[in-house]
Image (spheres, rainbow, N blue to C red):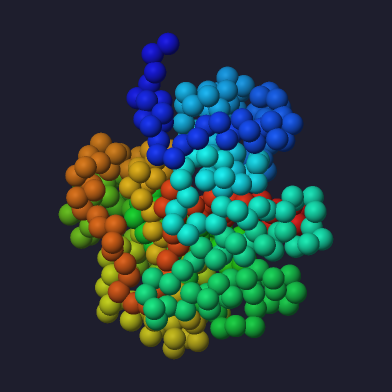
Amino acid sequence: MAMTEAQRVGKHHVGWRPEKLREMREAHGLTLERAGERLRQVAEQAKLRGIPAANPQTLWQHEQGEVYPGPHYRRAYCLLYRGTDPDLGFRNALPGEDTQFKLTPLDDQRNGGHVLAVERAVHRIAPGIDAADHMGLQQRILDAWKRRHTGGDPHRPVLVLVGGFAGSGKTEFARFLTQLTGWPLLDKDPQTRPLVERLLVALGGDQNDRHTELYRKQVRPVEYECLMQAAFANTRCGISTVLTAPFIAEMTNTEWMQRLINKCGAQGVDVFPIWVQCDLESMHEYITFRSAARDSWKLQRWEEYLSTINLDLRPAVPHVVVDNRLGAAVSLADQARHAIGAVYA
């Protein structure tokens, strides 16, 4: 049978050790059929998008190195075997990435395995520059998670901006913060997409346009203004809020960020910008997997799109960074959410 291009690329994926999947399956005492059933179960429980079919033939191809698992399979495997991508042989570990720590089995809560899982994921937040209070934000997130059922958070309200390039994993990480803290999530795309699409059509453009001057000059400013006004409606009520959008132009604009910080400060609200760092290969994979119409231009003209972005770009003000290269942060967030679900189910 002829091999597809995706399969040929998979065979040469840097650091891939497919034999690790077989070793993990056998260590758990699972047949291919049973592993497939369990894989579907954990994906459904974690509400992962794109639940894998996980038939025995596909799992066998993964274990034999014939097919490199897609992002939905990799996330489900990590949940099933309670490991990270490097643990399961999907890739090499990033510099400094901890692959020795093993999560406590979810059926043993006495030693706080769920707390360790959450803390481990939150510690992916690191300073982007020396002045950024990353430990302060980590503590605020953990305090909110621990206190949300015991009388509330004693800190000032906070506005968290989660930005990054398309496909960087910012939405997944923002959802993770919301699930930990109970803070509402305002995601630009689902919140403003109907308005943006109707406005583009009314102006004679394509509803999926996200790259022309028409979108950038006439539509994008309105889109972001809608998002920010929704956030201010929350912060005026003293409600901590998580915002997620690329924020490329906004976070790199010192004046825009300072105005936001000053406005929120006058309301007694702290602002924490988070930049989600990712690699080009992972971003391309994420964008391809989500199959959103608004991404069609990027995928069809990938090299041209790459010429418009700078992976070294960072916010112009003190900020924190989440390192999601090769999906590292999202994988840990998945496991923490899975642990939380076992606690609060």
- In this rendering, position of residue 126 left or right of residue 140: left
In this view, the residue in front, 14 or 121, is: 14
Point out the image quarter for the N terminus: top left
Asked if residue 280 is positioned above or below residue 16 in the image, the reply reads below
Residue 289, can we see it? Answer: yes
What residue is rendered at 45% in x and 74% in y? 272
Based on the displayed image, in which of its 4 quarters is residue 318 positioned?
Answer: bottom left
Q: Please count the marks in the image.
A: 0
Residue 111, how many percent across, how many down? 78, 62
Q: In this view, does 302 lie to the left or right of 80?
A: left
Place of residue 206 in the rendered image (x, y in percent of width and height, measured from the top left):
25, 43
Which residue is found at the position 46% from the left and 42% from the top? 91
- The percent coordinates of residue 98 (x first, y second) are 55, 57
Residue under the image location 55 percent in, 72 percent down: 138
- 270 and 139: which is toward the camera: 139
Q: Nearer the viewer, residue 149 or 1?
A: 1
| Residue found 35% across the figure and 67% down from its top | 225
**Residue 184 seen:** no
Q: Quadrant of residue 221?
A: bottom left
Query: Residue 259: x and y, percent?
Result: 33, 81
